[in-house]
Amino acid sequence: MHILPVSPSVPAEHDSPAPDRLISGDPQFTTWNLESADGLYCGIWRATPGKWHVSYDEWEYCRILSGVSILTETGQPPQTYTAGDSFILRPGFTGTWEVLETTTKDYVIRL
């Protein structure tokens, strides 16, 4: 089941990892940016299965709405996240994001 509490008036943006960040699969991203002002962004993000390198320069709060993802910070054990889980990614986080089952999350980013 995919829960997507987004107004139909919010346009979807489509993207994928940069080729130099892709590790496996063909992950596709869909993002609905609901708000952006004064360095704060929030919305809904969905990714299909695959794995890629990530590097964060910003703060991001995430809550998984559906799916299964594994985040692995460089030098740390993998962390699995499923529906209902919340976490914060801090500036300086580097590692990998792997989507095992199409994952939908809501997010708040602060630059």
Image (spheres, helix red, strand yellow):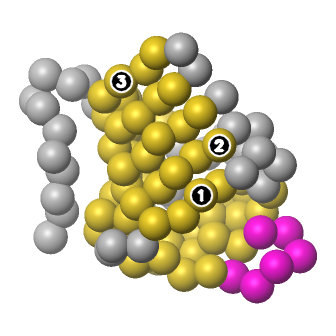
- The residue identified by callout 1 is 88
Q: Which residues are magenta?
A: 73-78
- The residue identified by callout 2 is 59
Residue 102: quadrant of the picture: bottom left
Mark 2 vs mark 1, CA separation in Å = 7 Å
Q: Going 80% across and 57% down the picture, which residue do you hit? A: 94
Q: Going 52% across and 51% down the picture, which residue do you hit? A: 61
What amino acid type should be assigned to the residue bearing mark 1?
A: Ile
- The secondary structure type at the circle numbered 2 is strand
Residue furthest top as drawn: 38
Answer whether labels 3 and 2 touch (C-beta < 8 Å).
no
Mark 3 vs mark 2, CA separation in Å = 16 Å
Residue 82 in the image: above or below residue 45: below
**Residue 23 horizontal/vertical position (percent):** 71, 63
Q: Going 18% across and 62% down the picture, which residue do you hit? A: 2
Is residue 38 in view?
yes
What amino acid type should be assigned to the residue bearing mark 2?
A: Trp
Residue 88: quadrant of the picture: bottom right
In this rendering, position of residue 1 left or right of residue 21: left
Residue furthest right as drawn: 75
